[in-house]
């Protein structure tokens, strides 16, 4: 199957090459990352908003040390992002092959290589490309660690990078930790606990800063009261919470228990907007294309998940499944993005189940045909 994977890699390069034709692009928080990288390079510290994206800032700072030419720096950042995307593609294939077989892995990799909504971020000086890539790379290394404990150190390093690339990583951290600890045995488990504890303690100031800044920035109750579905585009009317305190978590719990039906409807609508990619300002042709493609991808993913659960001889599928669940929870309590970045972080993992579901359906169809 090597030639099929090679063809998928070529497809990936062609699609990505199309996206990077205009050159490196700045948008949104790009300036925060570049300024933070300059601060780290000149002063050795990261402060302010850049702290929440410390790994990405550190990567940019390292690239800045290669050359002082700004244009060259931006091109090197984009080139590095594409290189990491390529690694993520190969890791996705590796996960699929180990969990579901080579055909399912090839389908997942092909969907990755054709995913416009993911690859569009490649030329941007933003965290999206790196975060999506490291979620996949971390999952692959954690899966390898469960088979060969010598991968423990690389997996911990990848998970740490993922956690500190952007605040979403905090939601995924417990999934990675639980998987590593529960899938190892004996001395390997003890070593994993010690190394993970040491890593968390060593990075605790950064993690605490990320959590504190994120909580203050997101204002979770505000997200519920505003009824935001798609950020800056769509919303619904929601009740307001009286006598709010300083504890956001307590206020959010009180809100959810006071208006459970309204809150559940809002969260379900956010997840629908994220998973089905529908946007009110898209053209009719665009929406019709999505109606044809996305439900099929998700339905096959559901078939693949059910088949993975029924197999009972491997728990490896739990890692991508719970990573998908964790990021879905982030979307449910915050909002869906108009540009699909939040769902893009986990869509490649969904493709794993889509690929497996496709092979299950194909095998069932062949079996039915032969029996007739």
Image: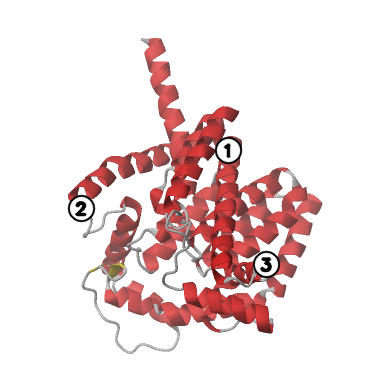
- Which mark is on residue 283? 2
- SS at mark 3 in the image: loop
- SS at mark 1 in the image: helix
Residue bearing the label numbered 1: 99
For label 3, count other residues whose C-alpha is less than 10 Å away and answer few (under 14), some (14-19) or many (20+).
few
Q: Are marks 1 and 3 in contact (CB under 8 Å)?
A: no
Q: Give how far across and how far down residue 176 sits, in percent.
A: 61, 57
Quadrant in which the N terminus appears: top right
Name the one closer to the observer, 319 or 250: 319
Q: Earlier in the sequence, mark 2 or mark 1?
A: 1
Residue 358's place in the image compared with 29, above or below, is above
Q: Give how far across and how far down residue 371 sits, in percent.
A: 40, 11
Q: In the figure, is residue 26 to the left or right of 157?
A: left
Name the one closer to the observer, 280 or 268: 280
- Mark 3 vs mark 2, foreground winner is 3
Name the one closer to the observer, 230 or 246: 230
For label 2, count other residues whose C-alpha is less than 10 Å away and answer few (under 14), some (14-19) or many (20+).
few
Which residue is located at x 50 percent, y 58 percent? Answer: 129
For label 1, count other residues whose C-alpha is less than 10 Å away and answer few (under 14), some (14-19) or many (20+).
many
Residue bearing the label numbered 3: 66
- Mark 1 vs mark 3, foreground winner is 3
Q: Earlier in the sequence, mark 3 or mark 2?
A: 3
Residue 92's place in the image compared with 72, above or below, is above
């Amino acid at each position: 199957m090597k030639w099929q994977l090679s063809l998928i890699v070529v497809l990936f390069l062609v699609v990505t090459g199309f996206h990077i034709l205009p050159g490196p692009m700045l948008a949104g928080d790009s300036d925060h990352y570049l300024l933070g990288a300059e601060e780290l390079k000149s002063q050795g510290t990261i402060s302010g908003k850049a702290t929440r994206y410390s790994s990405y800032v550190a990567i940019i700072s390292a690239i800045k040390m290669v050359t002082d030419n700004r244009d060259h720096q931006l091109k090197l950042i984009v080139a590095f992002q594409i290189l990491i995307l390529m690694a993520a593609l190969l890791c996705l294939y590796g996960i699929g092959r180990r969990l579901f077989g080579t055909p399912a892995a090839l389908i997942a990799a092909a969907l990755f290589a054709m995913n416009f909504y993911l690859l569009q971020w490649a030329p941007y000086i933003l965290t999206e490309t790196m975060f999506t890539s490291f979620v996949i790379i971390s999952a692959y290394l954690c899966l390898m660690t469960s088979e060969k404990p010598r991968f423990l150190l690389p997996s911990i390093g990848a998970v740490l990078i993922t956690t500190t690339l952007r605040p979403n990583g905090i939601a995924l951290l417990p999934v990675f930790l639980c998987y590593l600890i529960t899938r190892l045995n004996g001395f390997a488990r003890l070593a994993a606990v010690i190394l993970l504890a040491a890593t968390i303690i060593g990075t605790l100031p950064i993690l605490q800063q990320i959590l504190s800044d994120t909580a203050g920035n997101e204002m979770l109750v505000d997200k519920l009261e505003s009824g935001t579905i798609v950020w800056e585009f769509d919303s619904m009317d929601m009740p307001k919470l009286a006598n709010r305190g300083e504890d956001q978590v307590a206020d959010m719990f009180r809100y959810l228990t006071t208006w459970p039906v309204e809150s559940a409807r809002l969260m379900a609508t956010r997840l629908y907007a994220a998973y089905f990619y529908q946007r009110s300002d898209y053209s009719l042709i665009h929406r019709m294309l999505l109606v044809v493609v996305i439900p099929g991808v998700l339905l096959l993913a559901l078939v693949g998940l059910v088949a993975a659960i029924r197999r009972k001889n491997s728990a490896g599928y739990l890692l991508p499944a719970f990573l998908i669940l964790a990021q879905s929870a982030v979307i449910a309590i915050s909002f869906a993005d108009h540009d699909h970045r939040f769902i893009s972080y986990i869509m490649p993992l969904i493709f794993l189940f889509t690929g497996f579901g496709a092979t299950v359906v194909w095998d069932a169809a062949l079996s039915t045909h032969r029996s007739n």
